């Protein structure tokens, strides 16, 4: 096979904008489909140990599923992923109020975050990869955020079955930014209703503790000897039903892990293995943290690709900074100032075990 890019009309946005779907295929036959509505990852086909390709991400059957997309399936999240407490924070000494769409909190960029916008798309090809650049201007005041933000998301599928996603951005006024990808993975989506038997390792020795509003308290917990310990590979479901206050808050895993290596280089954050198919996913990131979410709030009322989206039917591994960082000065800042360039990169690499 050869590298290829297929572009097709995908529908029309609620605002009447034309939307496209771009399918990237590498020389091994793996493929990723991305729409410029929300810069959403719609499909991701990877091989099992026999070489059979199958889609391993949750998604909808048509564009209109992404118009509401309460679970953020495949979404590019921004400006700020996760929660901002009470929808407020100070930037350069001034208090800003953001759209409150999670009780009193601001979640995943608001009611019309990056996942609800039509991006300008441009495809590209190299000797060993195919990709798409997606560009967006988030105007000053968008969802309450200050500054005209020029942002680019780049998806690139490589011949070694690695899908990378890179974010860059500049602003004309000090703002905050904490982008991520919210894809829901199930390494055997065709046959396994849950991901509880799939094995996970996370290179993190601490998590940030949560209050009842799922906001970090500012305290950290050493994972050693707890239900949150994935320093050695274990089944995702091994401890998920334990009576634990932090698990009970989220109805399963929905917590931020502080990576042992917090450098801005691309480093391994997590590895997931499905022993039945042999698929192995390695997640790398330049971010200091990663959120583990086990689809606790899916309840079967939404569906797509011939299946309903049930509780624990997928997992998310979302590279990020600590949630509510602007209100938690003990953690790294997510401010972006004029003249600086935001850069964040993640990698989803696939291979198989014997």
Image: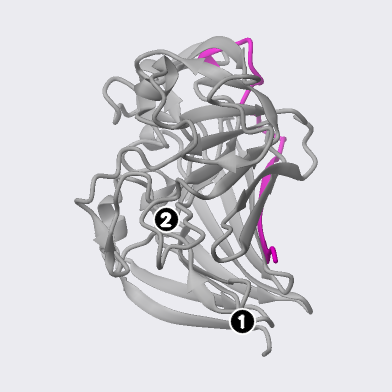
Q: Do the residues labelled 2 and 1 touch (CB within 8 Å)?
A: no
Residue 278: x and y in percent read 61, 64
* Lateral position of residue 180 relative to residue 20, left or right: right
Which picture quadrant has residue 83? top left
- Badge 1: residue crowd in 10 Å (few <14, some 14–19, many ≥20): some
Residue identified by numbered label 2: 38
Front residue (pair 344, 220)? 220
For the point 44% across and 32% down, the residue is 240
Check residue 29 in the rendering and tell me which mark sits there, or answer none.
1
Check residue 279 in the rendering and tell me which mark sits there, or answer none.
none
Q: Does the magenta stretch include residue 336?
A: yes
Residue 277: x and y in percent read 56, 66
Q: Does the magenta stretch include residue 98?
A: no
Front residue (pair 188, 10)? 188
Front residue (pair 109, 258)? 258
Q: Quadrant of the N terminus?
A: bottom right
Residue occupying the far bottom of the picture: 1
Q: Find the distance from the CA under tag 2 to the CA under tag 1.
A: 25 Å
* Lateral position of residue 76 relative to residue 343, left or right: left
When the figure is inspected, residue 1 is found, relative to residue 45, above or below; the finding is below
Specify start and end residues of the magenta stretch as a single range.
Answer: 326-354
Instruction: Tell me the element at label 2.
Output: loop
Q: In which quarter of the image is the C terminus?
A: bottom right
* Lateral position of residue 169 relative to residue 23, left or right: right
Residue 158: x and y in percent read 71, 70
For the point 80% across and 41% down, the residue is 265
């Amino acid at each position: 096979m050869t590298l290829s890019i297929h572009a097709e009309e995908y529908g029309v946005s609620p605002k009447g904008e034309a939307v496209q779907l771009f399918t990237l295929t590498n020389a091994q036959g793996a493929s990723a489909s991305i729409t410029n509505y929300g810069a959403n990852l719609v499909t991701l086909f990877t091989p099992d140990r026999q070489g059979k390709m199958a889609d391993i991400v949750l998604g909808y059957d048509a564009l209109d599923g992404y118009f509401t997309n309460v679970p953020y399936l495949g979404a590019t999240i921004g400006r700020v992923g996760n929660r901002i407490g009470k929808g407020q924070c100070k930037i350069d000494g001034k208090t800003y109020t953001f759209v409150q769409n999670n009780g009193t909190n601001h979640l995943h960029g608001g009611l019309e975050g990056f996942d609800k916008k039509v991006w300008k798309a441009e495809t590209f090809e190299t000797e060993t990869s195919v990709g798409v650049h997606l560009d967006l201007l988030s105007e000053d005041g968008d969802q309450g955020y200050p500054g005209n933000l020029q942002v680019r998301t780049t998806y690139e599928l490589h011949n070694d079955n690695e899908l990378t996603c890179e974010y860059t951005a500049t602003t004309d006024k000090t703002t905050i930014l904490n982008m991520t990808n919210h894809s829901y993975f199930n390494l055997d989506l065709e046959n396994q209703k849950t991901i509880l038997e799939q094995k996970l390792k996370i290179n993190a020795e601490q998590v940030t503790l949560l209050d009842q509003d799922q906001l970090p308290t500012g305290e950290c917990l050493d994972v050693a000897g707890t239900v949150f310990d994935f320093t050695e590979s274990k089944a995702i479901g091994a401890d998920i039903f334990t009576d634990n206050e932090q698990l009970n808050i989220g109805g399963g895993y929905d917590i931020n892990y502080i990576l042992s290596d917090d450098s801005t280089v691309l480093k391994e954050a997590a590895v997931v293995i499905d022993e039945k198919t042999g698929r192995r996913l390695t997640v790398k990131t330049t971010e200091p943290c990663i959120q583990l979410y086990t689809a606790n709030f899916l309840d079967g009322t939404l569906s797509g690709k011939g299946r309903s989206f049930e509780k624990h039917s997928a997992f998310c591994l979302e590279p990020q900074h600590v949630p509510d960082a602007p209100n938690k000065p003990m953690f790294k800042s997510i401010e972006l100032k004029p003249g600086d360039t935001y850069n964040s990169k993640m990698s989803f690499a696939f291979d198989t075990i014997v």
